[in-house]
Image (spheres, rainbow, N blue to C red):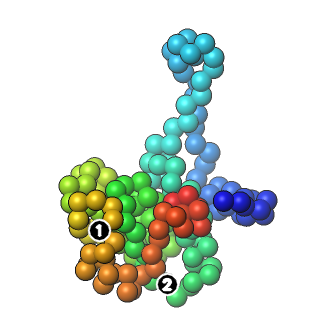
Amino acid sequence: MQFTRDEVAAARSTVAAFMPPTPQYQWPLLRQRLGMPVWVKHENHTPAGAFKVRGGATYFEALASTQPAVRGVIAATRGNHGQSVGWGARRHGLSATIVVPHGNSVEKNAAMRALGATLLEHGDDFGPRANSPSASRASSRCTWCRRSTATSCAAS
């Protein structure tokens, strides 16, 4: 995917408005082991605990300006994308419905719910989730936020 300089600048401005730069540190033991400086970027310090929140921020900014009538979004994921969607939707006053498989990580489900998302459990894997009857009802009221649109979800 190609982005113009202006698109990158706009995304950077959007992200910088809510999130300071992610901390990164040199770790002496990694340097010793690998024989070179190693910097570790701590994405767990972002608002949703994952880098994907940056993509969600840029996606929801674009959604708000291009489709102001949208009242909610729906996504199918196991975790980090759902956290980004939940966080971005809440920040823009939208509902977020996340379709997850049965038996999904309890911790990821809790994190998505804590960010305001409503979870629908369906199927055992990624494919069938989007086709559940509950997802179909939710998608009739919402816009799909797919990971593939995440770069307009910007890396969602």
**29 to 38, vertically: above or below:** above
Say few, some or many: other residues with alpha carbon within 10 Å of mark 2 (under 14 / 14 to 19 / 20 or more). Answer: some
**Residue 39 visible, this orientation:** yes
* Callout 2–callout 1 Cβ contact below 8 Å: no
In the image shown, does 111 or 125 lie closer to the viewer?
125
Quarter of the rendering containing residue 149: bottom right
Residue at 48% x, 63% y is 147
Compared across the picture, whether 91 is left or right of 109 comes to right
Q: Residues within 10 Å of mark 1 (few under 14, many from 20)?
A: some
Q: Is residue 116 visible?
A: no
Considering every residue shown, the one lying at the far right of the view is 5
Which disc is residue 92 wearing?
none
Q: Residue pushed farthest front?
A: 127
In the picture of the structure, the residue carrying the numbered disc 2 is 70
Q: Amino acid at mark 2?
A: Val
Q: Looking at the picture, how far across and down is residue 70, in whole percent? A: 49, 84
Mark 2, mark 1: which one is toward the viewer?
1
Which residue is drawn at the image coordinates 61% and 73% (left, top)?
Answer: 62
Depth check: give the residue in front, 92 or 98: 98
156 left or right, relative to 141 = right
- Residue at 58 percent across and 53 percent down: it is 19
Image position of 120 with respect to 65: above or below: above
Q: Position of residue 129 (x, y in %)?
A: 30, 68
According to the image, label 1 marks what residue? Answer: 128
Q: Residue at x 42, y 81 (%)?
A: 142
- 73 or 92: which is nearer to us? 73
* Residue 58 x/y as whole percent: 60, 64
